[in-house]
Amino acid sequence: LLGRDPTRRELVRHAVSAGGLAGAAVLSPASALAGSSAAQSDAAVIGRLLGLELLVVFTYDHVLASSLISPHARQVLGPLLAQDKAHVGALTAALARLGGTPPPGPADIAQADRYLAGRRVSGRLGQLRGGRDALRLLLAIEHVAEGAYYVSMLTLGDPQLLRLGAEMMASEAQHTTLISLLLHPGVPTQAVPYALVQGRH
Amino acid sequence: VSAVALIAGCGGSSVRGPANQVPQRLLRSDVESFNRALDLERRSIAAYTAGIPLLQGSDAMAAKQFLSQELAHAGELLGLIRDAGGTAIPRVASYDLGHPRTARQVLALLEMLENRQIAAYVAAIPTLSTGSVRASVASILADDAQHVSILRVALGSTAATSAFVTGRE
């Protein structure tokens, strides 16, 4: 199925052989596309977004488990972590529908720091010196998430995935705004600096 | 400075690709989406312009910045319409924005209008014909989502209510 776009009949046959009759009974036109070149391309994009969201969640988890941040910051960040976990759930489900395999998240702080370096984020979980340092790291990784969703708009093909990506990009943009407000209390103008939000990519 | 003059002066985005690579049928539907969004942006511009005098302090500062960003969004949409070979809908003379009399009423009106824009962008993005156009529109959507967060903070509401921002939260 990799060398050319498969016919619908081939896709159905492939799905039946992979998933058995139970799978065939619920096969929809959308699921029949799993394995097509378009679906593989979308799966690759969703897989990359999922890998990044897992890193975001790991970073939040580490910061919130530390004693670095104030109770007020903890109150603000908790719901943002929950929303990023919801992104992980949505991307995992989307990837499964496309027949992709979810990437592993960071196993430990050292690996997370390597991933952060790979994303050109300057902060390191293992070297946080205080609350502002932690907030700056969260802001940096959220900017990377914004940028990843922005780039996904260029490459995703499936309309439902495009809508999902747009909704999550807007969510990440709100996260950057709220973290910026924690860094600059009472200065909302610094929290929404650009008319066109493209994140870091 | 009038909102009209600022809109007219706004340019386009650097991320758009050549419009002539896209089938004309798709571009027409794009232009319809852009024009719907432009109408909503102009409505918000009118609301910010009328409402800012009722705001104070950091709320007023933020609203002024958001007005400037909404003007940039309108400019971006005009650029996209132009690139697609379309024609922008004419401006209407005035908008019925109700009669907000307090700062809180103004903030609530602005939040409602920003959410309308968000809903329109979320609906439009999957229908747009090219990736570069979708990315341009998503960058506007994300900024409007940030506006909503700040407006909610000013209103004392929860600033980010959903992991999936649809404009209907």
Image: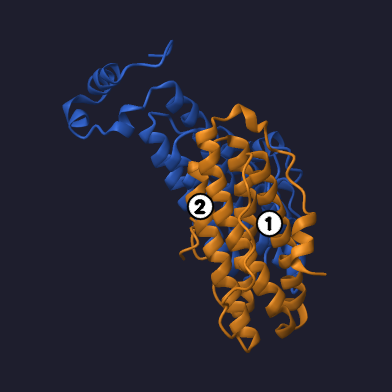
Chain colours: A blue, B orange
Using the rendered view, name the quadrant where residue B64 is placed: bottom right
Residue matched to label 2:
B122
Tag nearer the camera, 1 or 2 = 1
Residue matched to label 1:
B74
* Image quadrant occupied by the N terminus of chain B: bottom right
As drawn, B91 above or below B110: above
Report the chain holding disc 1. B
Residue B59 position in % (x across, y down)? 72, 77
Farthest residue to the top: give it: A3
Question: Dot 2: within a 10 Å radius of its alpha carbon, few (fewer than 14), some, or many (20 or more) residues?
Answer: many
Report the Cα–Cα distance between label 1 and label 2. Answer: 17 Å
Q: In this view, does A106 lie to the left or right of B169?
A: right
As drawn, B120 above or below A152: below
* Residue depicted at x 74% and y 55%: A194
Residue B60 position in % (x across, y down)? 75, 77
* Residue depicted at x 46% and y 64%: B168
As drawn, A185 above or below A147: below
Q: Which amino acid does label 1 sit on?
A: Ala
Asked whether the viewer can see residue B82, the reply is yes
Residue nearest the observer in this picture, A109 or A132: A132
Asked whether the viewer can see residue A84, the reply is no
* Residue depicted at x 61% and y 40%: B133
Residue B47 position in % (x across, y down)? 65, 74
SS label for mark 2: helix
Question: Dot 1: within a 10 Å radius of its alpha carbon, few (fewer than 14), some, or many (20 or more) residues?
Answer: many
Using the rendered view, name the quadrant where residue B9 is placed: bottom right
Q: What residue type is labelled 2?
A: Val
Residue A52 position in % (x across, y down)? 58, 40
Using the rendered view, name the quadrant where residue A53 is placed: top right
